[in-house]
Amino acid sequence: MGSFFELGVKEHLGSENQLVKLSKIINWNKLLAQLGNVHKEDGPRGYDPLKMFKSILLGQWHSLSDPGLEQSLRVRLDFLQFTGFTLGEDLPDETTFCRFRNKLIKQGKLDLLLNEINAQLEAAGLKVKSADTAIVDATIIKSNARPNKTLEQQEDGNYETKLSADVDAKWLKKGKKSYFGYQGFARVDKEGFVNKAHVTPANLPETKELDKMSDGLLPGTRLMTDKGFASKENREILRSKKLKTGLMYKATKNNGLTEKQSIFNKLVSKVRWRVEQCFGTMKRIFGMERASYFTNEKVDGQFKMKAMCLNLLKAINKVEFA
């Protein structure tokens, strides 16, 4: 049964199947360098780490819950073909997927996996290898839990406050709207591929994240941001790292923008749309409008996996398959 499956499934699915295409653009076995010791605390009993990673990546690609991923792996031929599992094989259940994903997060492997995927896309000419421009921005990620709220008055006259199940999520007011959740930060190149991603509670100031988001850039790179990152401190950070400033200028109550600063802001705006497009795709196609998990650590892990999905989708769209 297994050999029949392996021989016939690709022909059955056809070359236009998205997961068939996805299996071709990456040498997935090279990811074992990052995944090889993920089961170090479990001994030899764990499922193949590459099959598990490809499975949870599919879960993020299709915005599936862990039970949904378990069921899809049992009934979808393209899921089986892509992950390497076969018909009749003992398949992981939802709790196994959850534990494996948490291991990757705890062991800090998702950054390494994102870097490896990007390196392969660069080597294949599907992603700019050495860019002179980087763009940083943040987006709101709504919590998957209800916020803190005060319940009705109790018999003793006091009010009972119920804490949110998502202990790290916080409130942020933008304009006239308030949001409960997180901020996802992404650094993209001029094509919109994500090179770096991380998440903070929504109430933390985005200006303080530029130092982290600029780590690893080559000297001479121009880092572009919107007005939310504008500060004297951030300009000094870029100078200390020998990076060119692309921080938009922000008018203050007592000082408007000069003509030169206004022109500069317009030039930056013409490039910044790439990161906004990135967030739009992550939310519209990959379901990152709202987090699937609780706590900053787990939402950060989800955001990084969505970044992998985005980059892989962009790569697929650049390739013509026979």
Image (spheres, grey):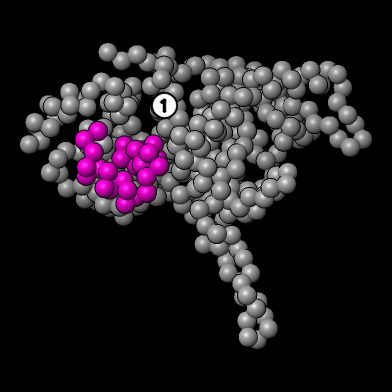
| Identity of the residue drawn at 54% across and 52% down | 143
In the rendered structure, the answer to whether residue 267 lies left or right of residue 23 reads right
| Identity of the residue drawn at 33% across and 31% down | 31
In the rendered structure, the answer to whether residue 117 lies left or right of residue 245 reads left
Between 78 and 200, the one lying in front of the other is 78
| Identity of the residue drawn at 32% across and 48% down | 68
Between 38 and 127, the one lying in front of the other is 127
**Is the residue 190 above or below the residue 80 in the image?**
above
Where residue 192 appears, as percent x and y from the top left, is 53, 24
Where residue 157 appears, as percent x and y from the top left, is 68, 83
Q: Is residue 41 visible?
A: no
| Identity of the residue drawn at 20% across and 38% down | 85
Between 3 and 105, the one lying in front of the other is 3
Look at the magenta stretch and give its main secondary structure. Answer: helix
Where residue 123 appears, as percent x and y from the top left, is 40, 16
Which of the 4 image quadrants contains residue 74? top left
**Is the residue 34 above or below the residue 142 in the image?**
above
Secondary structure found at label 1: helix
Residue 224 is one of the magenta-drawn residues: no
Quarter containing the C terminus: top left
Tag 1: amino acid: Leu
Between 258 and 112, the one lying in front of the other is 258
Which of the 4 image quadrants contains residue 164? bottom right
* Magenta segment boundaries in residue numbering: 54-78
Q: In this view, which residue lies farthest toward the bottom? A: 156
Which of the 4 image quadrants contains residue 11? top left
Q: Which residue is mark 1?
A: 313
Residue 68 is one of the magenta-drawn residues: yes
**Is the residue 66 above or below the residue 285 in the image?**
below
Where residue 15 appears, as percent x and y from the top left, is 25, 20
Crowding at mark 1 (Cα within 10 Å: few <14, some 14-19, many 20+): some
